[in-house]
Amino acid sequence: MANTPLWVFGYGSLMWNPGFAFDERAIARLDGFSRSFCMRSIHHRGTPEVPGLVLALDPVAGASCEGIVLRVKSGSEDDTIEYLRERELVSSAYLELSQRVELNDGRQVEAVTFVVDTDHVQYCGDLPLEEQAGIIARSVGGRGPNTEYLYNTAEHLAELGIRDAELDWLARRVREIEAGL
């Protein structure tokens, strides 16, 4: 990877907890995928007995996902990719792909992108939003409550000026469930 910048596309926790050093961060768009709670989490935000839900990029024709792209700190590319593989591929439910993303300033870069494997047992696309809210409200895993993951992601999207109507609805509904409404 010498002399080649490594870019990583983040659409969920990588936006607010990347876990690696980077030299540049920018808002970017990835076409052909939709951000959704379509992956059961049995490690980080749930357990095998009570799975949670985490975001994944679900392939959807005509869709796009806004997130961020991070240019990994020069010289730490190999360590970063090793870290990301350990973190993101813990249950092999994501596929590691290189995808073209467009930055807000018009540049296009190839970025490491983790997308859901729709053939994996943890894939659960098209769950109704109310069912998603119930799962997120009750699940806890090795990295903490599923609610924390949802709230942090929704807050960081809002700070970046990125609108995601489903995440906004889920955050409101999960707070209602927590309040007993």
Image (cartoon, rainbow, N blue to C red):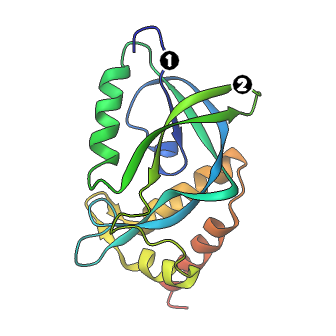
Numbered label attached to residue 107 = 2
Residue 119, horizontal then vertical, whole percent: 39, 64
Q: Residue furthest bottom?
A: 181
**Marks 1/2: CA–CA distance:** 14 Å
- Image quadrant holding the N terminus, namely top left
Identify the secondary structure beneath mark 2. loop
Above or below residue 47? Residue 44 is above
Closer to us: 115 or 55: 115
Locate residue 5 relative to residue 83 in the image: left or right. right
Helix, strand or loop for disc 1: loop
Q: Quadrant of residue 44?
A: bottom left
Quarter of the rendering occupied by the C terminus: bottom right
Residue 126 is situated, as x and y percent measured from the top left of the image, at: 55, 75
Q: Which residue is mark 1?
A: 5
Residue at position x 44%, y 14% from top? 74
Residue 129 lies, with reference to residue 59, above or below; the image says below
Amino acid at pointer 1? Pro
Q: Which residue does the image show at 49% across and 45% down from the upper left?
A: 16
Viewer-closest of 67 and 118? 118
Q: Is residue 71 above or below residue 162?
A: above
Q: Single out the residue that lies furthest toward the top.
A: 3
Q: Give the crowd class for mark 1: few <14, some 14-19, many >=20 residues within 10 Å.
A: some
